[in-house]
Image (tube, rainbow, N blue to C red):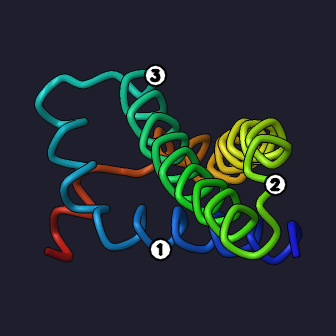
């Protein structure tokens, strides 16, 4: 299940970079450094992982409380899941983030 989530986040991050290539090239052409663009992509990935795993952990705690009355025991596990999901999303976006600086602004903007 974790591998599927990792692959899904990596796919979303990659497709996001493809769809926003013109925007990223425009930012690069206006003076943004490749390091700044990479940081932005990684931050977006981390926020996606945090929101997704945080909501999943909260749903798990809620279901544990509703079904078994053991919400307190599930809170620690939910925190671990949220941190792990955020780290996994950050790692999944590392590949697309590394390629952001390699985009040739004139070629991408000519296609737009």
Q: Residues within 10 Å of mark 2 (few under 14, many from 20)?
A: some
Q: Nearer the viewer, residue 43 or 14?
A: 43
Residue beneath label 2, please?
70
Q: Earlier in the sequence, mark 1 or mark 2?
A: 1
| x and y, in percent, of residue 91 in the image | 74, 43
Q: Residue at 21% x, 61% y: name it.
A: 22
For residue 35, which numbered disc appears in the image?
3
Foreground: disc 2 or disc 3 = 2
Residues tagged 2 and 3 counted as in contact (Cβ below 8 A) = no
Q: Quadrant of residue 61?
A: bottom right
| In the image, residue 17 above or below residue 41 | below
- Secondary structure under tag 3 reads helix
> How far apart are the alpha carbons under marks 1 and 2?
39 Å
Q: Nearer the viewer, residue 40 or 35?
A: 40
Residue beneath label 1, please?
15
| In the image, residue 77 above or below residue 68 | above
Q: Earlier in the sequence, mark 3 or mark 1?
A: 1
Name the quadrant of the C terminus.
bottom left
Q: Residue at 46% x, 22% y: name it.
A: 35
């Amino acid at each position: 299940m974790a591998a599927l989530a990792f692959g899904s986040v990596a796919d979303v991050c990659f497709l996001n970079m493809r769809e926003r290539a013109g925007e990223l090239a425009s930012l690069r052409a206006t003076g943004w450094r490749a390091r700044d663009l990479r940081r932005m992509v990684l931050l977006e990935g981390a926020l996606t992982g945090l929101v997704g795993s945080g909501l999943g952990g909260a749903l798990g705690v809620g279901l544990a409380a509703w079904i078994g009355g053991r919400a307190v025991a599930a809170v620690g596990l939910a925190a671990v899941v949220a941190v792990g999901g955020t780290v996994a999303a950050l790692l999944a976006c590392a590949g697309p983030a590394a390629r952001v600086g390699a985009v040739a602004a004139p070629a991408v903007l000519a296609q737009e």
